[in-house]
Image (cartoon, helix red, strand yellow):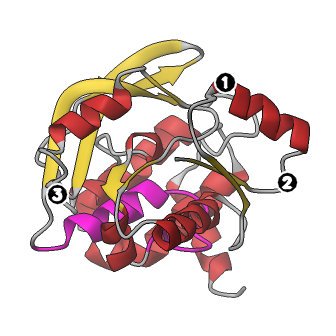
Amino acid sequence: MVVIVSDGRSLRDFERQSIQLKLPCMDFLFLDNGHSPGVAGSWNTGIKEILRIFSDCYVAIIDDDDRWQENHLVTCLNFSDYGSADVVVPGLHIVINDQVVDTNLPSNLRPADFLRGNPGWQGSNTFIKASILRSVGGFTDGLISCNDRDLAIRVLSRPTIDVRYTSTATAFWNCNSNPLALSAPRSVQKLRGCAQFLQLYERQMSELDRKFFFDRIEELFQWSMQDIEAEKRRLTFE
């Protein structure tokens, strides 16, 4: 089943029909975000409906500006060991200006890895059992960005979690894909999301973790430590 969640206006009938014609053998479910605006609310809307329909299944997420290779889903399923894995993490190509600039092949991920940055578990290469998403409370509603890192920390902190790695990249993350994207340089939403993430996890961060956290944000998104700290202070007054 393909679940499409609109975060904003509802898709028109002709838009839905156009999408369905591309995959005529698939069942589609079109939903509107029923939670806070943003990816977390959209994903939670889809997850809630999936758990209403299925007792359990794998959930594979893709953002509307990212893409998968044709073998992405079957590769993840093959590495799940007949459905015994809780999470399968495939590799990820990072794309800037239509060019692959780096490839992450995650392995042996730990919660602490995501305090500093993202070693390769993004939204669009998430492949996880719906029951695990339910057990950790889904995505943090209202968190504007860093949702993948927040989820990874909570999932990987479970003592019995079974995670498999494909060691091959089958997903593409389009970073800085357009001026309105969360990952665009100087995105105000990215600034707010990073400040929210810092507010959630700074007590778990060492000084070195903080340095890596701020350095990565400045390099990728052009927001300084001072910018993020100032935004975090504003959060406490809202």
Q: Earlier in the sequence, mark 1 or mark 2?
A: 2
Q: In front here: 209 or 142?
A: 142
Tell me whether the residue at label 1 lies in contact with that at label 2, contact meaning CB atoms closer than 8 angstroms.
no
Could you say where residue 189 lies in the image, as x and y percent from the top left? Answer: 68, 55
Horizontal arrangement in the rendering, residue 112 relative to residue 162 (left or right):
right
Residue at far bottom of view? 237
Instruction: Check disc 3: other Cα within 10 Å, few if <14, some if 14-19, many if 20+.
Output: some
Which mark is nearer the camera, 2 or 3? 2
Identify the mark at residue 110; answer none if there is no mark. Answer: 3
Q: Secondary structure at mark 3?
A: loop
Question: Measuring 24% from the left and 53% from the top, which residue is drawn there?
Answer: 87
- Amino acid type, residue under disc 3 in the picture: Arg
Instruction: Check disc 1: other Cα within 10 Å, few if <14, some if 14-19, many if 20+.
Output: few
- Return the residue at label 2: 10
The answer to which image quadrant residue 74 occupies is top left
Q: In front here: 177 or 158?
A: 158
Horizontal arrangement in the rendering, residue 179 relative to residue 98 (left or right):
right
Q: CA distance from mark 2 to mark 3?
A: 38 Å
Residue 152 lies in the magenta stretch: yes
Q: Secondary structure at mark 2?
A: loop
Residue at far top of view? 99
Question: Measuring 69% from the left and 87% from the top, which residue is drawn there?
Answer: 237
